Amino acid sequence: MTLANRLKMGALAAALCAPGLAWATQEAPLDLVQPIADYKLYVAVHTEKLIADATKFVAAIKAGDTKTAKALYAPTRMNYEAVEPVAELFSDLDSALDSRADDHEKKEEDPGFTGFHRLEYGLWEKNSTQGLSETADKLLADAKELHARIVKLTFPPEKVVGGAAALMEEVAKTKISGEEDRYSHTDLWDFKANFDGSQKIFVLLEPVLAKKDPDFVKKVAENFTVVDATLAKYRTAEGYEPYDKLSEPDRTVLSAKVNALAEDLSTLRGKLGLN
Amino acid sequence: MTTTKTPSCPFAASRRGFLLGAGAIAAAGGGAGAAIAAESEAARPQVADAPIAHSDARRRTPFYGVHQAGVVTPRPACGIVAAFDLVAANPEELQTLFRKLTERIAFLTQGGRAPDRDPKLPPADSGILGPVIEPDELTVTVSVGDSLFEDRAWLKPLKPKTLMRMAGFPNDALVARSCHGDVLLQFCANSQPTNIHALRDIIKNTSDSMVLRWRQEGSVPVVPPQPDGKSESARNFLGFRDGSANPDSNDDALMEKIVWVGAGDPDEPKWAHGGSYQVVRLIRMLVEDWDRTPLGEQERIFGREKWSGAPLGVLGGSEHDIPDYAADPKGDLTPLTAHMRLANPRRPETEANLIVRRGFNFSNGVTKSGHLEDGLLFLSYQADLAQGFLAVQSRLNGEPLEEYIKPFGGGYFFVLPGVRDESDYLGRSLIEAIA
């Protein structure tokens, strides 16, 4: 076993043995109680949908139906991508479900490389479902575990509020380049889910924010509109065009606006009085 | 952890002893003693203490002027160029960006206290220079690329006459991700952290309209002051002086002619007066190969003596001596293909091709083969791109130096005219010229 794997196993064991999370939950200020309750519902709906979609996705893989499995990959993932700020709180599950080959020493061949991108690699690079059964089963089991943990979780307000910026940072930092879904090139589906997840948090907080800083709300809403409109150009009947269809000028617009949103949304916690 | 510090050499000990003694004596005198005591304390730094800056750290380069700073300003030790793609769909958005750049650069180059914010918010400043930003002779020079004009119908008619997209020369191996850009920012300062701080500040404040495309850092060797007060051109990573043949940057009339676009250029759009064409070239130098080349061959490739920089055959000469090519028509002294002879043949008709070079050396990493990725961040300024760099580089095509260099990036840009005063902003003449 490699050192990296031993460390991962250690982290997993720690997470299982000590379900206490690594952060101290702040009391939600009164005006945030309702938005956070609504957000928890939003997340639970997505993780439930993740289980339902993953069930079909996994079934297609186990039936050897590469074509159906490929078609289900991106829409299944979207449920995860939309709620990433919360899903990421469980680092063992996030790593198992969503790590990339780069996160592993032996890249695609690394036994620690599991989850969505391992399945993506098999389906697109090898154009086959062969040898993916075990990873597929694990994906579904991890999705169920994620849902179970989320249902029991008291959502930390700073993680919820901070999640709006975190999703944008995620896109700006490592997704805008098209390196996330490098085998399937379904990156624009992920963008959509990340944008929606961020916007959901913003919309839930909007009534509170509008009282404090209406100019800020207007600016953020405008940038979301530009981002949505730019991405909408690439809508297809099933979902979104492959990443390589994204034009250079549109990529620049997305990059700039996503960075601007990350910059502005990073002040949300402070604006709402959270540490 | 011990706090006792043992002097590392007898000289240090005796010097400190002397200072302490002097301090004790002077203490009776009050303030002076305290100052000396402070100096003795300063003479005992800890391993991770910030190195003490050159006194230049508090010097400012003026921001306002007919021309932007950073072109004929003496080059400090460190530089960065950063190219950006722009989101500016209309003149208003471009104007907003230019005003924001003006505001940030006016602050950064003159220094001051970073604003305080509620600690629940992300800080306004990165803090890498501390709460007070020292100007450190920082200049930030803003230039615009061919694509800014070509990609926007409302700007296209205003493109400077000879501005174009950089095309590869025969020895180039251009890498798309290191070329071109709508806007280029050139940062120059005495220390690299000052440049990095300014770059981060500008990125943070302009993220809704500028996306970083590529960047290159560089520096030049710092030399001790010469006893005779003379200065000399900095050396490149091939060990040769670079910039010896530059025209005198203190001669304003000459700079108006060679560097700045102005009334003498009737074909240029009027908004461009006070600006300059800027060439940026990222040139990898194959230093391991070069270091295995005999000294005599190195000198014949450049046409100069390595140490003095003097033209070959000028006994006891200096880098500023003018080579007499008329007396050496066959290239017995200076080969006809020597870099400096091709670049500037010193003929009346090649006077029009003079340019001002102001580059930095870069050191980027390691190739897959385990070689150094070192080279030259070439920067030049001229009043006419075609007559300037393009003409010079065309003469250099096929020169023997090519065996040791490989240009891979950069671009051609136009330095915007200067900001006259506080009511002015970068690019105002361009914005006002939009029909």
Image (cartoon, coloured by chain):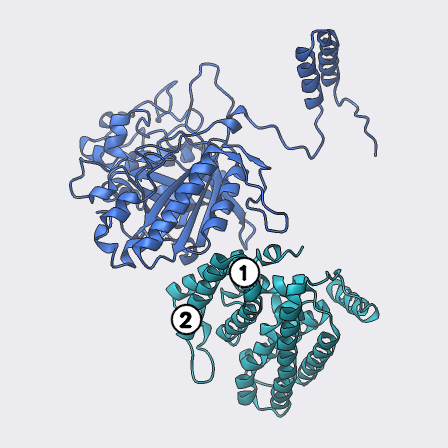
Chain colours: A cyan, B blue
Please state the chain letter of the residue tagged with numbered disc 1 in the rendered image.
A
Of residues A121 and A260, the one nearer the viewer is A260
Q: Residues within 10 Å of mark 1 (few under 14, many from 20)?
A: few
Amino acid tagged 1 = Lys
- Give the quarter of the image for residue A144: bottom right
Element at label 2: helix
Question: Horizontal and vertical percent for residue A19?
Answer: 80, 69
Whether label 1 touches label 2, CB < 8 Å: no
Q: Is residue A62 left or right of residue B92?
A: right
Q: Residue sitting at 59 percent across and 62 percent down?
A: A166
Please state the chain letter of the residue tagged with numbered disc 2 in the rendered image.
A
Element at label 1: helix
Amino acid tagged 2 = Ala
C-alpha gap between disc 1 and disc 2? 27 Å
Determine if marks 1 and 2 fall on one subunit: yes
Question: Horizontal and vertical percent for residue B324?
Answer: 26, 25
Q: Is residue A233 above or below residue B103?
A: below
Q: Residue sitting at 50 percent across and 73 percent down?
A: A192
Residue A229's mark? 2
Q: Is residue A191 left or right of residue B270?
A: right
Say which residue label 1 marks. Answer: A211
Total labels: the figure holds 2
Question: Horizontal and vertical percent for residue B22?
Answer: 71, 9
- Give the quarter of the image for residue B175: bottom left
Which quadrant is the N terminus of chain A positioned in? Answer: bottom right
